[in-house]
Image (cartoon, rainbow, N blue to C red):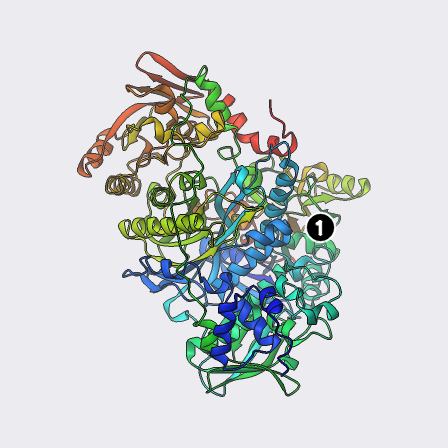
């Protein structure tokens, strides 16, 4: 092995610091070869090692009676009873989706699906949290629209062909994401307790099998391209974004699940980020074994690839297993190596050793940083403009037609949200619900983020997001049981950004403990900055819950003459709490003040109340108040097929704009024929509840005392809301 | 009644069809692997939705060469009942068991939504449990569901009462709002909407049963 080629420039090009290189020297006791340096660079990257956040992620609660597998594996596993378990996780594909929206998003879906089925679980649901720049931005609007269209069709392409339903998600537009769109994909799978597989290379002498697509030069880390050796051989820069093949992945899924049933598989791991490198060393490290592979045996898409390229390739749809049924599905399955007893990752090609590194050094000895942090970055003012609306109905219309609050039907109709016939509640519901066939249990899933709240206060903002997810689940009758998260932030080497991260993680820890939803895994995406401008701090939280399999209680008012009850009360927010709302975003184009105040104990009691009522079928509809507040929630309740509106009569001292549009948590709207039952349940749980009106056909009217705040035909509001996104895409300059 | 459900690599509604037939209709259902050259003793065959062989080249273009399709052709020629749903419909047109072709939706986007259909004829083994003119709501989920054929073929389909299902709100630009067609012998039907997705009250509707119950109660094949 020649080592003369490792100059400080080469080390820097691999995004390794001088200190990190020193650590490599001491771990190896010699200079690394270029291949070894490449291997270290990907395994010790932020993406693979969580080196900036690991010390803080430890603060998250990870255990409960239902947690079968916490963080550290490909996905978390939760017991849902009857011997059945679910595996779920969220992952980001932010950077690739900006470079190449279609393939970036598609391979994001592919990657997270492999994480799920590599554990033995069949994926049954996907949700997406996607964020873009504003579609009507005069300068960047055209690009933002193109990225949105590409991302949506990429998700649709991969998920639809693979045969997993995309059952929900969220889509947000905000200036800060125009140079850094966020694409976070959540996937959930189901299996029996005795069908769980782990990524462990146990059993010295066992063969190591490579299955799936051939290895190509795609996805090799950009840093490696800058190194001297490869400018010669790789004349043109290969795309850093991989290309996905959902059909191949579908075959891989069926073959893997079938192979697992034979009992021949000892361990299995997908080749995701850092491909062959991470799968070999992580499987060896977990089992305390060595893995020796011969690259000459690896199925290759093109000739002349170097060991460096093969070890760093991120070609999609590949699996590594320690032990065969793959012929039937027409997949390449090749023995490429063997499990050894020396704990080393040994990479050979035609008898020459190109890398020899202790597995533990790669998988477990990555640097961990206590990065300095100060006060969270915050540019928003403490106070904002006073509100003096001339026309509250016009305000409501503007909110309903805004990118964040309008119907996302244009997006989710491109996704097959029904395949596998488990979708009891799909896109557009407060929480998605998928039944688990063969049991009487269904799983509900809520996915949420709020960069605006977190920009004002990352700790409180993150707690609000957890509360919102749990409220979404409770509103459909589910009991929240476990959490996954995707932390999207800027550059952690900036103390004010690191502070956002730390505060957000601590808020997540506090709320997840309180709501008893342990964190079983997740993903961290850092360096989301363009030209020094970071994105809004955007933790995205996915929480799953369980409920009995039944026809869901709808979000919309089903008929006239029902009593509308607001559980949780009107709230008593201060003006400052308006600064993060959609009202201020849409009407003032502003961001100031503080996020809404959250009383977690009260929130929990509100959730218990609605869960009890929904499960008892004591309510005919239920919808939680979220962004846009009471007025937007009431409008959404009226957008059913029958245009069933409501006559609402309030009696409040709050200023009109705050009364209608504040986003205080812990509030849920229900419609019922059994007012007494609803009030009694609220009383038992010590939460406020009051009848505020009655449902009626075709009109939404909201009065406060004698003051008519809103009076509109449902159709006028619904039309705007239903078509706003297409309008923004095709006629982006709105008057 | 025993229904065989063909599994191509890339089929992904195979299990849904199996579940609807075996769990919702309580009839026998079994999977038939694409490399099988014999259908065994099934009474009817469903070609399910999905992306057979990845739908590379053209939807259904590779599937038509699979061993199982030779068997399905023989089965159909002997009067056996064959229902193609979505990708199954595409495969049936590709291999010539049904006329016409399915091309990309008029708006070039995949569409998943419940659509209103009109039963255009009740005179078939796939629709006899419904009434002519009856409205059904059954979801579609496809990127290439726009039915096309030349004018002569369309006229013949109409004249011979072989248009089985028509869209009330056409989601994909299909000519003459065609959602499902029959072969001349009326023992093969292709349809883009997914009846297996609305065969269970929990899925928000049961209109798909009109099709599936017609099939399982169609009796033994006529062997015309």
The quarter of the rendered structure image containing the C terminus of chain A is top right
Q: Is residue A193 above or below residue B176?
A: below
The quarter of the rendered structure image containing the N terminus of chain A is bottom right
Position of residue B25 in the picture relative to residue A479 (left or right):
right
Q: Residue furthest top?
A: A706
Q: Chain of mark 1?
A: B
Residue A352, given in percent of the width and then of the height, sits at 64, 86
Residue B208, given in percent of the width and then of the height, sits at 53, 46
Q: Is residue A9 above or below residue A509?
A: below
SS for tag 1? loop
Number of numbered discs visible in the structure rendering:
1
Residue B130, given in percent of the width and then of the height, sits at 56, 41
Position of residue A331 in the picture relative to residue B210 (left or right):
right
Q: Quadrant of residue A628?
A: top left
- A211 or B17: nearer the viewer: A211
Q: Quadrant of residue A213?
A: bottom right
- B30 or A398: nearer the viewer: A398
Residue A331, given in percent of the width and then of the height, sits at 63, 72
Q: Is residue B23 above or below residue A305?
A: above
Q: Residue at x 41, y 17 (%)?
A: A388
- A652 or B69: nearer the viewer: A652
Position of residue A617 in the picture relative to residue B39 (left or right):
left
- Residue assigned mark 1: B183
- B214 or A415: nearer the viewer: A415
Position of residue B128 in the picture relative to residue A231 (left or right):
left
Residue A481: tell me if it is visible. yes
Q: Residues within 10 Å of mark 1 (few under 14, many from 20)?
A: some
Q: Quadrant of residue A314?
A: bottom right
Residue B1: tell me if it is visible. no
């Amino acid at each position: 092995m020649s080592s003369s080629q490792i100059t400080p420039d080469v080390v820097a090009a691999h995004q390794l610091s001088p200190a990190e290189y020193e650590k490599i020297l001491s771990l190896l006791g010699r200079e690394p070869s270029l291949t070894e340096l490449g291997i270290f660079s990907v395994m010790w990257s932020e993406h693979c090692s969580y080196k900036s956040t690991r010390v803080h992620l430890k603060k998250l609660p990870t255990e409960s009676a239902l947690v079968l597998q916490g963080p550290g594996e490909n996905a978390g596993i939760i017991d849902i009873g009857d011997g059945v378990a679910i595996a779920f996780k969220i992952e980001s594909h932010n950077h690739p989706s900006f470079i190449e929206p279609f393939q970036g998003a598609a391979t994001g879906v592919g990657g997270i699906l492999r994480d799920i089925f590599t554990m033995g679980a069949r994926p049954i649901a996907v949700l997406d949290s996607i964020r873009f720049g504003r579609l009507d931005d005069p300068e960047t609007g055209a690009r933002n629209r193109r990225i949105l269209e590409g991302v949506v069709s990429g998700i649709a392409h991969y998920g639809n062909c693979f045969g997993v339903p995309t059952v929900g998600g969220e889509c947000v537009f905000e200036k800060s994401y125009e140079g850094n769109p966020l694409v976070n994909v959540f996937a959930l799978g189901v299996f029996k307790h005795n069908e769980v597989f782990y990524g462990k290379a146990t059993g010295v002498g066992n063969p190591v099998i490579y299955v799936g697509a051939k290895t190509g030069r795609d996805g090799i880390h950009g840093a490696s391209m800058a190194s001297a050796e490869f400018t010669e051989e790789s004349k043109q820069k290969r795309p850093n974004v991989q290309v996905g093949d959902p059909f191949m992945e579908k075959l891989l899924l069926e073959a893997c699940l079938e192979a697992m049933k034979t009992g021949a598989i000892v361990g299995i791991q997908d080749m995701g980020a850092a491909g062959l490198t991470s799968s070999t060393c992580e499987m060896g490290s977990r089992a305390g074994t060595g893995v020796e592979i011969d690259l000459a045996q690896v199925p290759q898409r093109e000739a002349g690839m170097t060991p460096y390229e093969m070890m760093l390739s991120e070609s999609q749809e590949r699996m590594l297993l320690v032990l065969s049924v793959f012929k039937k599905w027409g997949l390449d399955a090749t023995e490429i190596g063997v499990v050894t007893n020396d704990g080393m990752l040994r990479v050979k090609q035609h008898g020459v050793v190109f890398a020899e590194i202790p597995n533990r050094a790669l998988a477990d000895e990555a640097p961990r940083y206590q990065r300095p942090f100060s006060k969270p970055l915050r540019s928003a003012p403490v106070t904002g403009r006073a509100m003096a609306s001339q026309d509250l109905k016009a305000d409501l219309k503007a909110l309903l037609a805004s990118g964040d609050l309008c119907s996302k039907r244009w997006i989710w109709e491109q996704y097959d949200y029904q395949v596998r016939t488990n979708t009891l509640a799909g896109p557009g519901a407060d929480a998605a619900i998928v039944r688990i066939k063969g049991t009487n249990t269904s799983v509900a899933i809520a996915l949420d983020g709020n960069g605006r709240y977190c920009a004002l206060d990352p700790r409180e903002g993150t707690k609000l997001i957890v509360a919102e997810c749990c409220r979404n689940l409770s509103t459909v009758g589910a009991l929240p049981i476990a959490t996954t998260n995707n932390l999207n932030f800027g550059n952690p080497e900036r103390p004010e950004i690191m502070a956002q991260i730390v505060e957000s993680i601590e808020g997540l820890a506090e709320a997840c403990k309180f709501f008893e939803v342990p964190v079983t895994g997740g993903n961290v995406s850092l360096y989301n900055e363009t030209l020094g401008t970071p994105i809004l701090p955007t933790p995205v939280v996915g929480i799953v819950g369980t409920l009995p399999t039944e026809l869901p209680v709808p979000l919309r008012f089903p008929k006239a003459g029902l009593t509308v009850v607001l559980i949780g009360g009107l709230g008593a927010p201060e003006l400052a709490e308006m600064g993060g709302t959609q009202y201020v975003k849409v009407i003032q184009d502003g961001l100031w003040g503080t996020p809404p105040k959250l009383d977690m104990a009260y929130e929990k009691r509100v959730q218990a109340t609605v869960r009890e009522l929904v499960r008892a079928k004591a309510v005919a509809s239920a919808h939680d108040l979220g962004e846009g507040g009471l007025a937007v929630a009431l409008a959404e309740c009226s957008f059913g097929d029958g245009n069933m509106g409501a006559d609402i009569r309030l009696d409040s001292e709050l200023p009109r704009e705050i009364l209608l549009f504040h986003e205080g948590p812990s509030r849920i709207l229900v419609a019922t024929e059994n007012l007494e039952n609803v009030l009694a349940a609220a009383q038992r749980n010590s939460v406020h509840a009051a009848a505020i009106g009655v449902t009626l056909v075709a009109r939404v009217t909201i009065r406060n005392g004698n003051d008519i705040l809103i009076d509109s035909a449902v159709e006028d509001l619904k039309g705007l809301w239903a078509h706003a996104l297409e309008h923004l895409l095709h006629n982006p300059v709105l008057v | 009644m025993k229904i065989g459900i063909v599994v191509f690599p890339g089929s992904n509604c195979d299990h849904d069809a199996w579940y609807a037939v075996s769990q919702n209709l309580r009839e026998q259902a079994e999977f038939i692997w694409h490399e099988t050259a014999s259908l065994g003793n099934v009474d009817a065959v469903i070609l399910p939705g999905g992306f057979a062989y990845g739908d590379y080249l053209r939807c259904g273009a590779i599937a038509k060469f699979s061993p199982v399709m030779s068997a399905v052709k023989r089965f159909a020629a002997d009067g056996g009942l064959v229902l193609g749903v979505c990708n199954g419909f595409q495969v049936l047109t590709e291999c010539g068991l049904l006329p016409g072709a399915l091309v990309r939706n008029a708006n070039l986007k995949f569409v998943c939504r419940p659509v209103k259909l009109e039963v255009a004829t009740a005179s078939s083994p796939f629709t006899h449990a419904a009434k002519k003119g009856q409205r059904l709501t059954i979801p579609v989920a496809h990127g290439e569901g726009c039915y096309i054929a030349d004018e002569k073929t369309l006229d013949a389909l109409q004249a011979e009462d072989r248009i089985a299902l028509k869209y009330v709100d056409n989601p994909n630009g299909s000519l003459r709002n065609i959602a499902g067609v029959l072969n001349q012998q009326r023992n093969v039907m292709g349809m883009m909407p997914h009846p297996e997705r609305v065969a269970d009250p929990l899925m928000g509707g049961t209109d798909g049963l009109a099709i599936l119950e017609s099939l399982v109660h169609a009796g033994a094949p006529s062997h015309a």
